[in-house]
Amino acid sequence: MNKQNEQDLRFMLDATENVTIGPLNTEFLAKPISILEPKEPILVKEDTLIKDIIPLFQTHKCEAVFITNIDEKLVGIYTERDLVLKSLKDKDFENNEVSLYMTKDVLSGKMDHTIAYVLNILSDGGFKQFPIIDDNGYPIAHITLRNILDYIVKESIKPLLDVSIPKVNN
């Protein structure tokens, strides 16, 4: 989604302020992704060997690592799916650099992008991970579909948890 589409989406959300769309309302969708408390990304250089990345998936319980170049700018992403669908095809994949298998031209965003924008990117692309970069292109965080779902669930049940249950006198 380009900048114009993002602006159009924000306009539509503003024009339909606090309208319910299915289980969500536009007020939630118009909020910046920063409210989701994005997680710090696991970063590796593009010349990192696959055998050095596999333990990161296990140690950090993550599904992806973000690949940076020598200038520490985001140049790709390597996921568990890439491991299974791309790397395992090569006999000696563990000794190859991640740059051979990573997904390049990764779509990324900024902390002020709306939740609607990120959901649209993830849905359209079939992605689970969304890297967040600063103004210089350095990865600073990432959002996952799980982050969004957890937030929706937490916010949805909050009113139920705030309800006090009356005590029964014996």
Image (tube, rainbow, N blue to C red):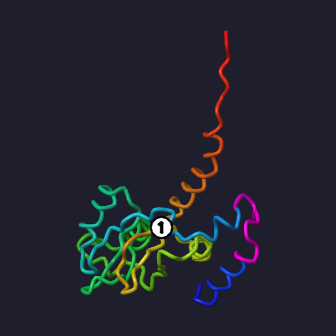
Outermost residue on the top side: it is 170
Where residue 165 appears, x then y in whole percent? 66, 29
Is 110 part of what is drawn in magenta?
Answer: no
| Quadrant of the rendering where the C terminus is positioned | top right
Where residue 56 appears, x then y in whole percent? 29, 62
Q: Looking at the image, which is closer to me, 135 or 43?
A: 135
In which image quadrant can residue 51 be found? Answer: bottom left
| Quadrant of the rendering where the N terminus is positioned | bottom right
Where residue 157 appears, x then y in whole percent? 62, 46
Highlighted range, magenta: 13-24
Which residue sits at x=75%, y=77%? 15
**Left or right position of 34 against 93:** right
**Left or right position of 55 against 161:** left
Q: Is residue 6 above or below residue 90?
A: below
For mark 1, give the secondary structure.
strand
**Left or right position of 61 against 4:** left
Q: Is residue 86 above or below residue 162?
A: below
- Which residue is labeled 1 in the image? 143
Which residue sits at x=61%, y=39%? 161
